[in-house]
Image (tube, helix red, strand yellow):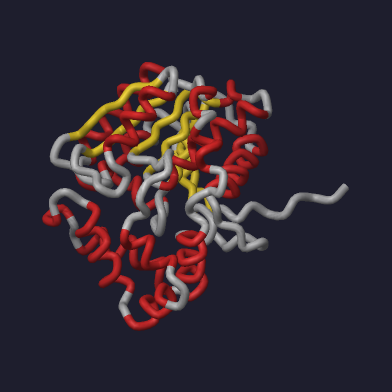
Amino acid sequence: MKLPPPLPLDVVRRGEGPPLVFLHGFGASRFTFRKWADALAREHALHLMDLFGCGAAPPPADGRYGPVEQAEAVVRYVREEDLRGATLIGHSLGGGVALLVALRLGDLGEADRLAGLVSVAGPAYPQAIPRYIGLARLPLLGALLFAVARPERIVRSVLDYIVFDKGTVDDEQVEGYAAPLRTRVTRRALIRTARQIVPGNLAALAARFPEVRTPALLLWGRHDHIIPLWVGERLARDLPRSRLEVIERCGHVPPEERPEESLRVVREFLAEVGG
């Protein structure tokens, strides 16, 4: 029997209890959730993922970095680990991947593996591509940008662009996101992810969102201009068991900008779904 190839993921596990699977955003890593992890690990088993080519994870052998491929890897992980009563918690790109995971588990007749789904500013519908992702998608320019600019300079510029208050960006954040980008492999993966970030069948996938009956929390910053609030509002209409929570004076990264307030909302949701 031919064994499947190793999963191109890197997972850190912490704590015991109902499982939480964390999925980060574009160009990021599990570092995004560090301000939530200590509190949540007291009551849950945390599965903190680095997705394809991000953080400590290797690139996929087939060079496919799209959200559908990312979701297939997460589904495989959930099934191989036999996770049950799990809650997916995804930020930005990770939120979109979480939706696709829920759809795929439904197709497999295993939707009951999930107790809940948390999409923190996750993409879901056709929209304008954020400027920093658009630059990385351009032939030669993305590679040239990383060749001439220091990773910490790029990271600080992006963070300043996506948050509501630039004063929340500190050196720890910049270093945490910049460190993985100092390797050529990770920089190449970031560019390939940018070029594959929109599924070719996105409209067809979006039309299926009403099939996701897993209880869902949609958590958005009021001032998010990367994945605008209208995405969360539309998702709240399309997902039959969802609710939208909006955090004021917050941009695209609630776990960084408003860690205590956003964590409180997530913990209340977990208590409701029994996760």
Of all residues shown, which one is farthest toward the right?
1
Q: At x 19% / y 42%, what residue is drawn?
A: 223
Nearer to me, 232 or 91: 232
* Residue at image coords 49%, 43%: 13
Q: Is residue 56 visible?
A: no
User: Is there any visible trace of residue 114 in the rendered image?
Assistant: yes
Q: Would residue 238 be found to the left or right of residue 73 on screen?
A: left
Foreground pick, 84 / 73? 73
Rendered view: 157 above or below 86: below
Q: Please determine whether, in this image, residue 200 is positioned above or below residue 20.
A: below
Q: Quadrant of the C terminus?
A: top left
* Number of numbered discs overlaid on the protein picture: 0
Q: What residue is drawn where x is 55% and y is 53%?
A: 66
Residue 70 horizontal/vertical position (percent)? 56, 48
191 lies above or below 219: below
Residue extending farthest bottom? 148
Q: Is residue 90 left or right of residue 9?
A: left
- Snapshot quadrant of residue 187: bottom left
Q: Residue 149 location, x and y as percent?
A: 31, 79
Q: Quadrant of residue 76?
A: top right
Q: Position of residue 1 (x, y in %)?
A: 88, 47
Task: List x then y, in percent, for residue 46.
Answer: 46, 38
**Residue placed most toward the observer, 203 or 44:** 203
Q: With 70 as the anchor, is 269 left or right in this view?
A: left
What residue is shown at x 50% (from left), y 70% (from top)? 188
